[in-house]
Amino acid sequence: MAALPHDGAVNEPLPGPPDPWAPSEMPPFRSRPPYLMTEMIAAEPALAQRLVRRLETNPAVASLADAVRRASEAREPILLTGCGTSQHAAMGIAELLTEGLAPPAGHEVRAIEALPALRRPLRRGVLIGVSHEGGTRATNAALEATREAGGTTALITVGPGSPGAALADHLVTTEEQDQSWCHTVGYLSPIVAGIVLAARISGTRLDAAAINALLDVANEPRDGANVAAGLAETDRVIVTGAGVDHVSAREMALKITEGARLAATSIELETVLHGHLAAATRWTGLVVIATDGIGDGLPAERLRRLFDAAHALSMPTAALLDERLAGDIHPSLTPAGRITLPRTGRVQGVPASLLAPVIPFQLVAERLARARGVDPDTIGRENEAQAAAHA
């Protein structure tokens, strides 16, 4: 594995994919921090800025934007797919493209799981796969089936040499590879690629420095450590959010599960109130992510109802809250801590909602791994049973 930037050198590019392509090997085990995950999180603000600047002038982005625009104008389906972290990034990109295209109701861009995409391949329209290394079998099978059926295929991945890259009519590469198997860069990179793609479609000008700043100001390890401490003694964690925030909730739950080896589940905010609290106790953690324009009316009422219900059950509750919401939620309702998410006028809409919580929820997962004494980079596969299950 290539050498990584040391402390003080987080602005240096990360290693690219291997050439010739090969799947990554399990990262070397580290018995104590900093982990590779720690270093990846630190590198993300500068990486995002580099990625925006590279992709803004990338002809592959322009050609994919044209294909997506044509499909939308023809009312043809536009689907995103992936597996695991890449599926969550695909969900985020679907939200970004829907905002950028502003299609009529019923023609929104959607994200679907890879196996359904394989079973019912597109005969027209565009299927965009997301795969960090380009070797995910189910994602590649979905791309191959769509290509054979007559649809247009695209892939957002780290490099051009992978099996998945060979199946894409349009290939967008991010060039810098995540060095931890608890993917953080592997989530942020395709999200940033989606931001650039959506901006190209809508004719919006991006501010790469502002994206760097938004991520950098959110990189406060003490806040993540405080929330991790509030959740460390729980038996399981529910992570919730509505709308775009449900994308972040899904990814946070996965990071906690694979990185800290603490069972975590993501459930859409309203759904939590419909039965999922029946098994909750004071040993059940709750994390609420709220950035996506909750505003007034029913969404705000349901958000407050969830906090009140968790309080009645003595659940260790934490929150990642947009700074405009933080004052509306009394501190007593977040006994496991809270992180106030910054806003900037230069990054707005879906990009802001997706980017603001990224580093905070990654830091919570990384600090939970520390508290539980596990190396997040290996996602447990130094254990023989886990390795056998994966194989």
Image (tube, grey):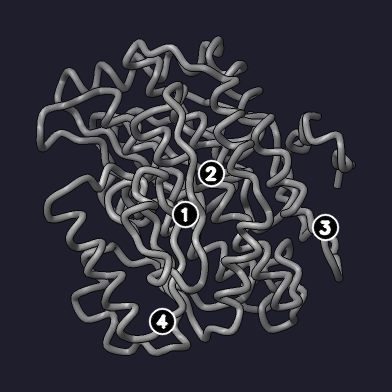
**Residue 308 x/y as whole percent:** 27, 74
Tell me whether the residue at label 3 lies in contact with that at label 4, contact meaning CB atoms closer than 8 angstroms: no
Q: Residue at x 42, y 59 (%)?
A: 250
Foreground tag (2 vs 4): 4
**Residue 280 x/y as whole percent:** 35, 86
- Category of crowding for the residue at label 2, using alpha-carbon neighbours closer than 10 angstroms: few (below 14), some (14–19), many (at least 20): many
Does residue 144 appear anywhere in the picture?
Answer: no
Tell me whether the residue at label 1 lies in contact with that at label 2, contact meaning CB atoms closer than 8 angstroms: yes
Q: Is residue 109 above or below residue 254?
A: above
Mark 3: secondary structure: loop
Which residue is labeled 1 in the image?
83
Foreground tag (1 vs 3): 3
Q: CA distance from mark 2 to mark 4?
A: 36 Å
* Res. 145 image quadrant: top left
Type of the residue with mark 3? Pro
Type of the residue with mark 2? Ser
Tell me whether the residue at label 2 lies in contact with that at label 3, contact meaning CB atoms closer than 8 angstroms: no
Tell me whether the residue at label 1 lies in contact with that at label 3, contact meaning CB atoms closer than 8 angstroms: no
* Res. 58 image quadrant: top right
Type of the residue with mark 1? Cys
N-terminal label among 1 and 3: 3
Q: Is residue 198 above or below residue 62?
A: below
Q: Is residue 153 left or right of residue 72?
A: right
**Residue 45 x/y as whole percent:** 65, 34
> Which mark identifies residue 131?
2
N-terminal label among 3 and 4: 3
Foreground tag (4 vs 1): 4
Q: CA distance from mark 1 to mark 3?
A: 27 Å
